[in-house]
């Protein structure tokens, strides 16, 4: 269970989050939508302790991670897997080394067992047999899928996705959406997806949270959000710019 | 206090505080044995083996120039055979450690800042953290330890090559008597001179690694941020080495000459 209470964060002089609160139940699949540059990725990084808020609480299974130091956070992060916007694969390593990275200091697993776990994770993301390739040899979609394999190989309880389909063609984006659903159903993980792609949001989310003006502006099931009459929500869903905000 | 925080003095003090905290964390990581021997070996290879050409050329030509210039001056007062002693003492306590450290700062320090900076802007450092790996254990600690080991070895190599090159130039090119040269060199070069050089090299190794790692891990966004971090890493570590050298010469000189 993830609970965020009155989270506030400024980057430099600019306030990015101003009193964000929500709760995500175990096994739930939640999509956070909002404008580009609106603080969605910043919010996501707070959930795993990559950023420290200026105020507020982030509770993971009832435990507040905000006051924890880096060492204590390492223990909490074992519950998480995260797929980054640019996949963030380690470019000095092969695909297999990337995916097996989480097992580096795991002495309870034999090398053969690790190889099997890596191969199986790559099969889940429909990329079998690419263990020896380098990240630089992969397309954008493949990199994201390897990033997903790396995030799920150690069976985390919660998977965070930061703009998983951004920069991909519609077919590749669709395959990533399918994978997110497959991972959710197969491993029964809690999924938190940050995106501004409405098609993805509708398909993946059991619940949608809309971040607007530094706060959670709207929350509901995809049906509720997509049939909302609120002008701000409607403009976002329909992709219509606000005439009162020049340049947007 | 707010006024101070907004000036470059405030930023400088903040940076100094952060690099001190990073160093403390790194030393804790090293003392608790959290580094992987494979990472350490790779860094030793990268810093030690890959710096061979740079260090050999620097050491050899410094020794040769120093030998020739000392000979030209000493020849006027008929002190030709003291040439190699000057080369040896200078190479051991000053030129060997400082020039090796400056060359390594240019090659290794820049590479560390560029690599870690790129990892930061492409979120690879964040990815490490999500994979329950502390970037200090994985990235900084092996580099610091490798630099502490590699720099003294490279310096010893530069000193030996410099003295050898100075000997060849002095004896074979300028015609100094080899026996007296060798005798004077051994007479005037003390264990303390070699110890001072190696202690300096150990400290400079730490400066190069920590400045490079700190600049890389705190670099700004994009290619510009990485470029700036790389440049600043070389500039700051070089300046720090030159300033530290003065104080180390004074303090270590006092210690070793009073023994």
Image: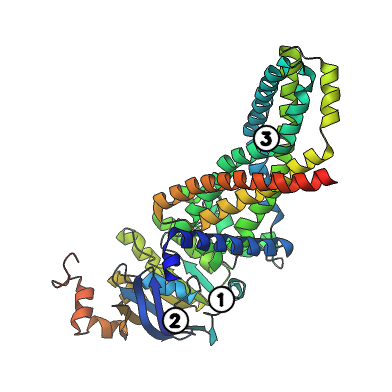
- Quarter residue B37 falls in: bottom right
Q: Please check whether the numbered discs 2 and 1 fall on a single chain.
A: yes
Asked if residue A229 lies left or right of residue A218, the reply is left
Q: Tell me how far mark 3 sits from mark 1, CA to CA.
A: 53 Å
Q: Chain of mark 1?
A: A
Residue, disc 2: A55
Mark 3 vs mark 2, CA separation in Å: 53 Å
Q: Where does the image place residue B213, in percent across and percent down from the top left?
A: 57, 54
Q: Quadrant of the C terminus of chain A?
A: bottom left
Total marks placed:
3
User: In terms of secondary structure, where does tag 2 sit?
Assistant: strand
Query: Closer to us: mark 3 or mark 2?
Result: 3
Number of residues whose C-alpha sits closer than 10 Å to that of mark 3, classed few (under 14), some (14–19) or many (20 or more): many
Q: Secondary structure at mark 3?
A: helix
Q: Position of residue B80 (x, y in %)?
A: 76, 17
Query: Disc 3 marks which residue?
Result: B95
Question: Disc 1 on helix, strand or loop?
Answer: loop
- Up the image or down, A231 lies above or below B47; here it is below
Q: Which residue is mark 1?
A: A79
Q: Position of residue B162 (x, y in %)?
A: 71, 28
- Residue A224 position in % (x across, y down): 27, 86
């Amino acid at each position: 269970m993830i609970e965020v209470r009155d989270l506030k964060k400024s980057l430099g002089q600019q306030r990015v989050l101003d009193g964000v609160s929500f709760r995500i139940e175990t096994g739930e699949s939640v999509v956070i939508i909002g404008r580009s540059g609106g603080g969605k990725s910043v919010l996501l990084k707070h959930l795993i302790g990559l950023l420290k808020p200026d105020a507020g609480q982030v509770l993971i299974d009832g435990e507040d991670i905000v006051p924890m130091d880096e060492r204590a956070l390492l223990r909490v992060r074992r519950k998480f897997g995260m797929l980054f916007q640019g996949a963030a694969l380690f470019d000095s390593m092969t695909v297999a080394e990337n995916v097996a990275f989480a097992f580096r200091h795991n002495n309870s697993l034999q090398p053969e067992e690790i190889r099997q776990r890596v191969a199986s994770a790559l099969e889940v993301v429909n990329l079998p047999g690419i263990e020896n390739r380098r990240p630089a040899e992969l397309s954008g979609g493949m990199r994201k899928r390897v990033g997903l394999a790396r995030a799920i190989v150690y069976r985390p309880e919660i998977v965070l996705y930061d703009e998983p389909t951004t920069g991909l063609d519609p077919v590749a984006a669709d395959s990533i959406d399918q994978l997110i659903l497959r991972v959710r159903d197969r491993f029964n993980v809690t999924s938190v997806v940050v995106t501004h792609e409405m098609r993805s949001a509708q398909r993946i989310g059991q619940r949608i949270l809309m971040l607007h003006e530094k706060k959670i502006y709207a929350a509901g099931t995809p049906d509720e959000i997509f049939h909302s009459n609120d002008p701000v929500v409607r403009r976002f869903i329909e992709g219509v710019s606000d005439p009162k905000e020049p340049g947007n | 206090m707010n006024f101070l925080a907004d000036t470059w003095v405030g930023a400088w003090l903040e940076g100094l505080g952060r690099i001190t905290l990073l160093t403390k964390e790194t030393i804790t990581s090293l003392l608790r044995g959290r580094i992987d021997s494979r990472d350490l070996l790779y860094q030793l290879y990268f810093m030690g083996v890959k710096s061979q050409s740079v260090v050999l050329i620097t050491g050899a030509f410094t020794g040769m120039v120093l030998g020739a210039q000392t000979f030209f001056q000493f020849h006027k007062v008929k002190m030709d055979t003291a040439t190699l002693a000057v080369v040896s003492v200078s190479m051991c306590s000053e030129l060997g450690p400082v020039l090796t450290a400056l060359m390594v700062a240019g090659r290794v320090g820049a590479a560390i800042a560029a690599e870690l900076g790129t990892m930061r802007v492409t979120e690879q450092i964040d990815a490490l953290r999500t994979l329950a790996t502390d970037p200090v254990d994985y990235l900084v600690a092996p580099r610091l330890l490798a630099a502490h080991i590699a720099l003294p070895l490279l310096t010893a190599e530069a000193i030996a090559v410099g003295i050898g090159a100075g000997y060849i130039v002095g004896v074979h090119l300028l015609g100094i008597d080899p026996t007296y040269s060798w005798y004077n060199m051994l007479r005037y070069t003390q264990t303390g001179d070699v110890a001072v050089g190696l202690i300096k090299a150990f400290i400079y190794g730490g400066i190069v690694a920590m400045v490079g790692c700190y600049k890389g891990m705190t670099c700004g966004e994009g290619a510009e941020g990485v470029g700036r971090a790389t440049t600043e890493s070389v500039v700051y570590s070089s300046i720090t080495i030159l300033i530290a050298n003065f104080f180390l010469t004074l303090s270590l000189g006092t210690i070793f000459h009073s023994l």
